Amino acid sequence: MKLWEPIKIKRDKDHYWQIGPLKIWLKKIKDEWLIAYEQSPHDPESTDITIAEVREKPDTVTWNRYVCESPDSIQLLPVLQDRAVVVGSEMPVKILPGNSALFVVRIPVWVHLYAGEKKETMLTEIPTVPLSNTWFGDPMTGELCYSLTTMARRSIEETDNNPHRAICPVRIKNSSKGSLDFQKLSIHVEHLKVYAGKETLWTNEVKITFFGEDQPNRIDFADKKPDLEKDCILLSKERTPVDRSLLKKSVSFFKYFTSFES
């Protein structure tokens, strides 16, 4: 995907990118990088893409200035959030004992801006879509997360190919003795890689094993390309690598308490 390739820029010129609802302006002046952006909350499903077009910044947005000596090239790369996201099911789903179900979740990426020819310096990161904060879990042992407006779906055909969203496969296995009533879950996206497929972004697969209401859930992150599209290229590594399964005793993936949302 050309959007995520390094680009040479012209000094003293305003360069413009659009990645779905996110608009970015960038300029290089001497040893300074100037970056401005705006998000379109009224059009979060936009599929528009513009790559490094010379276009003057409007007066309604403000430059942020970064002093950094580097070659006149820039690279934008997609990454996932710095903490977990909470997503709900598109419709009520019960997973019977011994069974597993695959869901796909569309997650809006953040954009890292790297100066230099070989990702030498990260200047800043910008969310393509601003997300609300939410509390997941009980009041004492839960955690602060981001709340997704998209829903977990059962079919890949039901998802849209938005340039600013990565498709995350989530496999939930019910290893308990009772039926699992799936409503909402927390996905620790800070442990996920981002890949470029032919038409969309992807992450590696997440597997959640449910053992029962009073037992910790096991979370595994596949260390490979997603099976749903193996012909893809790694763009960004995970923010926080993990080399073993996570056991989240303080979080029940299928009990949801909201203390606040902002």
Image (cartoon, helix red, strand yellow):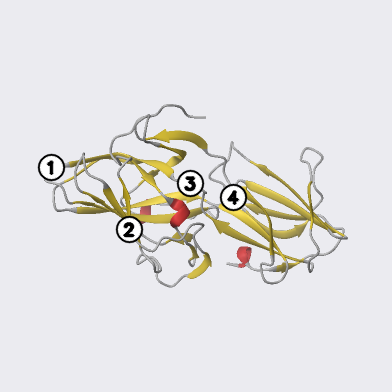
Residue 220 percent location from the top left of the image: 33, 58
Task: Check whether the beta carbons of the residues at disc 3 and disc 1 lie within 8 A of each other.
Answer: no
Q: Where is residue 59, by image quadrant?
A: top right
* Nearest the eye: 162 or 217: 217
Q: Name the residue under label 2.
A: 245
Task: Check whether the beta carbons of the residues at disc 3 and disc 4 lie within 8 A of each other.
Answer: no
Q: Pick whichever of labels 1 and 2 is earlier in the sequence.
A: 1
Name the mark nearer the viewer: 3 or 4: 3
- Residue drawn where x is 60% and y is 61% of the image: 77
Q: Name the residue under label 4.
A: 20
Q: Is mark 4 on a helix, strand or loop?
A: loop
Q: Which amino acid does label 2 sit on?
A: Ser
Q: Name the residue under label 3.
A: 83
Name the mark nearer the viewer: 1 or 4: 1
Q: Name the residue under label 1.
A: 178
Residue 49 percent location from the top left of the image: 62, 56
Q: Which amino acid does label 4 sit on?
A: Gly
Q: Is mark 3 on a helix, strand or loop?
A: loop
As displayed, is residue 144 above or below residue 153? Answer: above
